[in-house]
Every structure is written in C-alpha cells, then in structure tokens.
Amino acid sequence: MGIGDASPSENQSAHKEQRDETTPLLPVKAEEEDGIHEFNGASFSGAVFNLSTTIVGAGIMALPASIKMLGIIPGILMIILVALLTEASIDMMVRCSHQAKITSYGWLMGDSFGQWGRIALQASVVINNIGVMIVYMIIIGDVLSGTSTAGVHHRGIFEGWFGPHFWNSRPVVLLATTIFVFAPLVSFKRLDSLRYTSALSVALAVVFVVITAGIAILRLIEGTAEIPKLFPEIHELNSIWELFTAVPVLVTAYICHYNVHSIDNELEDRSQTKPIVRTSLALCSSVYVATSFFAYLLFGEGTLSDVLANFDSDLHIPFSSVFNDIVRVSYVVHVMLVFPIVFFALRLNLDGLLFPTSRHISHDNRRFTIITVSLLAVIYLAANFIPSIWDAFQFTGATAAVLIGFIFPAMIILRDSYGIATKRDKVLAVTMIVLAVLSNSVALYSDAMSIFYRKVEA
C-alpha cells in the first residue's frame, strides 16, 4: 500500500468523523443511559402531521394581509406557485441525500460545498427559526394580552375576560407560557415523540379555517361582507415595489426544509418521503388558500398583519364574542404546539455550529439543557420588544428563509456532486435562484424605504 493510500478502516473513520460533525440528527437507535432503545420507525401519518405542523405555523396569520396587498387572484396563484417550488426544492434535496446516503441538510451542504457550506446552512436555520419562534410568541402575546395597531387597541382574551391587570400583561403571560408550556414540550429528544401534539395542532388549524370560512360565507349571504379586490391597486411606481414585500411572507409560510431529513431518517421506508412531502404540501396549501380568502373576505381592507388581532371586534353574527374566543384560543394552542417542532431543528443546528466535533447533543444532558434554556430566554426577550409579526417575517423571509428553501437546494443540484441532475433540474434550479434573488432584493429595498419614510414622518 502506497504512502498516499488510506486503509479501509481509516477511510471509514474519516467518513464517520465527517458524519458526526455535520449531522444534527438522532440515530435510529437512541442510546439511553440504561442501554439501547429500539425505535421501529415513524408512521406515514405521523410524518405527515410533523411536516405539516412545521409548515403551518405563524405564517398563516400573515397570509390574509398578503392577499389584501396582492389581490385575490394574484395572491392565491402565488400561494400555489410557492408550494410547487417548495416541492421541487425538497425533491432536489431528498434525491441527492438518498443517492449519497446523507442524513442531514447540513451534511448535504457540507458534502457539496465544504465546511463553509455547512456553516452557512446551519446559520440560516438558526436565524430563520429564531425569527419564526419570536413571531409565535408575538402572536400568543397579541391574542392573550392584546395589541395596539395604528393607535387602535385590540383587547386580548384575558383582558376581555378579566380586565387589564399586571398578571395578564404581555411579559407575564409570555413568561408563564415559556415556563409551563414550552419548556416541557422542547425537552423531548426525538421528533416522533411530538406526533400526537402535531396531529392536534393541525386539527386546531383546520378548526380555525372552518369557523372563519363559515362566518365569512354567512356574512356574504346576508350581504354584510365587503367584496374583496381581485387585483392589486397600483397608483404609482412605489405601489409596485410594495407588492414585493408580500413575497418573504409567502416564502416563510412554506419553509420546512430543516426538518425534512429528521422526518426522513425516522421513517422505516424512506421511499415514502416524496408522497409524505406532497401530501403535507397539498394539505397546507388548501389551508392557506382557504384561510387567506375567507379571512380577507371577512375583514376586507381592515385585515391586520396578524389576522388573529381582528377577532376582537363585532363579527355581526349571533354569539360573535364566543366565536371570536374560540378562533383565537384554538389558534394560540396550535402555535404553542408548533413551537417545539421548529425549536427541535433550531437547537440541533445551533449545537452543530457551536460544537461541530462534540458528541450528539441528545447524549449530553448538560449541553442540551444550557442551549435549550438560553434559546428560550432569547426568544422570550425578543418577543417583548419586536412590535409586529410583519416586521419579523420581512427580515427572516427575505434572508434566511429564501436561502434555506430555494437558493441552497438549487445550488446543490447545480453543483451536482452525485451526478443525478437532469437538464430540467438545472433549468428549474437557475429559475429558482433568479426569482428568489430578484424578488427578495426588491422586497428588502422596499422595506428599507418604508422604514426610512416612517422615521422621516415621525
């Protein structure tokens, strides 16, 4: 054997080292302190619920405002287009991963672009998921404690029931939610452990859609609903630029790529991944279209960036206050149950950034606890200072989310380290990159100008 040749055992050791460094995932057999616990694989339905829960998070609350900006027809077409592009980008990831027997997004980026590729991906997941979970907390605060928009105060559920008190203020309510709800749920070390809470969260999202649709249809029959605009109103050049600010919200609404490998790894039959992704995207797209259409039909031009805040007013139907509370409570519980799913990927990727060569975080309770508590504290503090979910979505959607969802998968397929890319794949990859860069650059420019003019007017 020559000097430059490595023995099979050395190659295997080097491959294992790369996998340990870049794979923030639980193994199929979880090593516990008292031995090895066999895990027989996640079910199809459990995987669909977990992926759907990753997708249908807080983004659904900002989609009616996007429809208000774009108009009904362009808005619904954009929801469908982003869903199709999301399916294509996930398919690119999964095919490359299965070909090379790669078990994480970070490992896939590292294998294609080296250490800096892995770091770029994991940093993007951390930024995106922290932003998304801050949005979750803002929504919980808005609904339970109330919010003020353009000088108008929208009462929260607790404020409406008991009046304003210190104990139902936003900081106290969010602190109690963090300690008594989030802390126990984020303590699980396996994603499949959350399959039942995921199923419940999807059911609650459907409850929200059904009630909203029922009220909107009733108002439409009675003739009290405002007829929504089908197309955007464009008065000047700035109106066109402002339309692009809806793009990051739509992109963020479908970002689930960081959990695809975790779900894929826990399946007994990995050939089920593609139908699971398609089923989840079809389910979530239906929920998105229905929510956006009926919520905009119900509230018209008064639709807020967080549509849940609209459910504190008179709906002009019998038992209006009861339906308001049912809608808000059901969706707040949904958001609480989505939180640990997104947190799962955040913790694993942050650990991969900070401790790339350490043993898996699930086997180090001290590191697991420190990172979990630190992240909860940061998210809690940020949620008390960021005023609107629209502001948070604009930043994460136009930066980290578009990288995770479209640019990185397209770059992987263009690099084609595994020799599986077709001409169609490469054309689609180039198209995704061009669309993502152009639309989100315009969105960032428009947001920056909007912030600048707000400060000048103030």
Image (cartoon, helix red, strand yellow):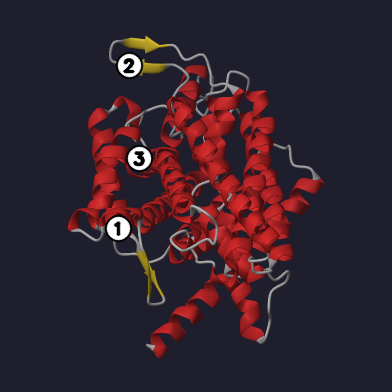
Please indicate whether residue 131 sits to the left or right of residue 399 in the image. Answer: left
Residues at marks 3 and 2, CA–CA distance in whole angstroms: 19 Å
Please state the horizontal and vertical placement of residue 278, each as a whole percent of the image.
69, 37
Residue furthest to the bottom in view is 457
Which residue is label 3 attached to?
Answer: 351
Q: Residues within 10 Å of mark 1 (few under 14, many from 20)?
A: some
Q: Is residue 117 left or right of residue 210?
A: left
The amino acid type, in three-letter code, at marker 3 is Asp
The residue nearer to you, when weighing 37 against 72, is: 72
Give the residue displayed 30% in from the left and 58% down from the top. Answer: 159
Residue 228 is situated, as x and y percent measured from the top left of the image, at 68, 68
Residue extending furthest front?
318
Mark number displayed over residue 32:
2
Q: What residue type is labelled 1?
A: Glu
* Nearer to me, 28 or 157: 157
**Label 1 element class:** helix
Looking at the image, is 278 positioned above or below residue 80? above
Label 3 or label 2, whichever comes before in sequence order = 2
Residue drawn 34% across the image and 28% down it:
362
Task: Tell me the quarter of the image containing the C terminus.
Answer: bottom left
